Amino acid sequence: MAAFDLVDKKIEMDIYEIIRFQLMTYCYVHEISITDSDLECLTLLGTKDEFDQAEFFDLTIKYEIFKTPQTVRNSLKKAKEYNLICKKGDWKKVVFLNPELGIKTKGNILLNYKVIHVEAR
């Protein structure tokens, strides 16, 4: 069996940071390229079960993630193409993180990733 150099780190994060970290990790592992603004948009989306789409547009502009509703719409469209978000409703749409991502957004959260690299012999 191969010997490993073990790096053991413990980091405490607030809920916003831990949602952001999970999204960054998911996108990295699945080779999904997103901008920092897209990541902030998705993180904000993860802070609630679901958002009214119009309310979410206003919130992203208020927090200066994006400047216009159209840029929010473009970001959400890209996220939907990558299957990162879901939308429901016809007249009054709601948006939310895709539950299939497995992103934890509530309660006490412990992330336990085990990532290895084994050198070829």
Image (spheres, rainbow, N blue to C red):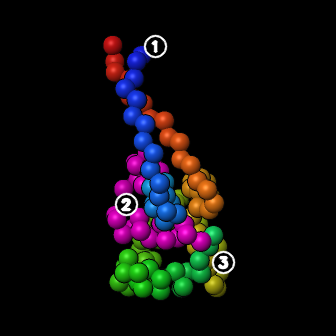
Q: Which residue is mark 2?
A: 34
As shown in the figure, which amino acid type bears the numbered disc 1?
Met
Q: Is residue 43 visible?
A: yes
Work out whether 96 lies above or below 11: below
Work out whether 4 lies above or below 61: above
Quick one: quadrant of the C terminus?
A: top left
User: Which residues make up the magenta segment?
Assistant: 23-48
Q: Which residue is mark 1?
A: 1
Question: In the rendered image, which quarter is residue 20 located in?
Answer: bottom left
Where residue 35 appears, as percent x and y from the top left, is 34, 64
Q: In this rendering, which labeled residue sits more in front, label 3 or label 2?
A: 2
Residue sitting nearer the eye, 92 or 97: 97
What is the secondary structure assignment of the residue under circle 3?
loop
The label on residue 115 is: none
Residue at the image point whose x is 44% and y is 50% from the top: 11
Q: Which residue is mark 3?
A: 89
Where residue 12 appears, as percent x and y from the top left, is 47, 54
What is the secondary structure assignment of the residue under circle 1?
loop
How crowded pointer 1 is (Cα within 10 Å; few <14, some 14-19, many 20+) is rated as few
